Amino acid sequence: MLCFDFGAKRIGVAVGQTLTGTATALEIIPARNGRPDWNRIGALVGQWQPQALVVGDPLNMDGSRQCLGDAADAFARRLHGRYRLPVLRADERLSSVEAATRQPRQAPIDHIAAQVILEGWLRDVGKI
């Protein structure tokens, strides 16, 4: 599985597997005005051959949608349209907070947030 933490400027990517329930942060893909580097995403899909893709669902603590929700939805639809793989959604609340505790220095954490999102999905759902 590949997991994406969608952002308007950066998209964190992690890979994981349902058998072991583990995830690993991979990289951060730059985006321009919410448009991802589709060539890089395609290369990752080709390299990892995932059975499904997971996209973080940006929710507030009360369960309401964050302003980035519509853009994340559009990204998820485009992933499905391009790669014809199941695209699953995962609650990403507090993923950035957890990612920051794993990498305390002042560096981008988007790929670690994707790892946290995927770990939560594997723990809570885990099967496709």
Image (cartoon, grey):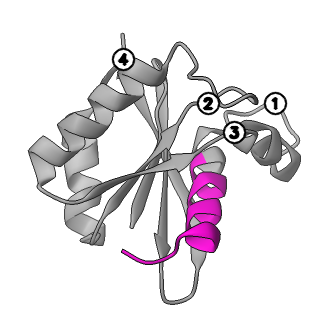
SS at badge 3: loop
When the figure is inspected, residue 51 is found, relative to residue 85, above or below; the finding is below
In the rendering, which numbered label is found on residue 59?
A: 2
In the rendering, which numbered label is found on residue 34?
A: 4
Region in magenta: 114-128
Q: Are discs 3 and 2 less than 8 Å apart at CB? A: yes
Mark 3 to mark 2: distance in Å?
A: 6 Å
Q: Nearer the viewer, residue 45 or 85?
A: 85
Q: Amino acid at mark 4?
A: Gly
Q: Nearer the viewer, residue 60 or 2?
A: 60
Q: What crowding class fits label 4: few (fewer than 14 Cα within 10 Å), some (14-19), or many (20 or more)?
A: some
Q: Amino acid at mark 3?
A: Arg
* Image position of 99 (left or right of 108): right
Question: What is the count of numbered marks?
Answer: 4
Q: Sequence-wise, which precedes: disc 2 or disc 4?
A: 4
When the figure is inspected, residue 8 is found, relative to residue 123, above or below; the finding is above
What residue is pinned by disc 3? Answer: 93
Q: Is residue 120 magenta?
A: yes
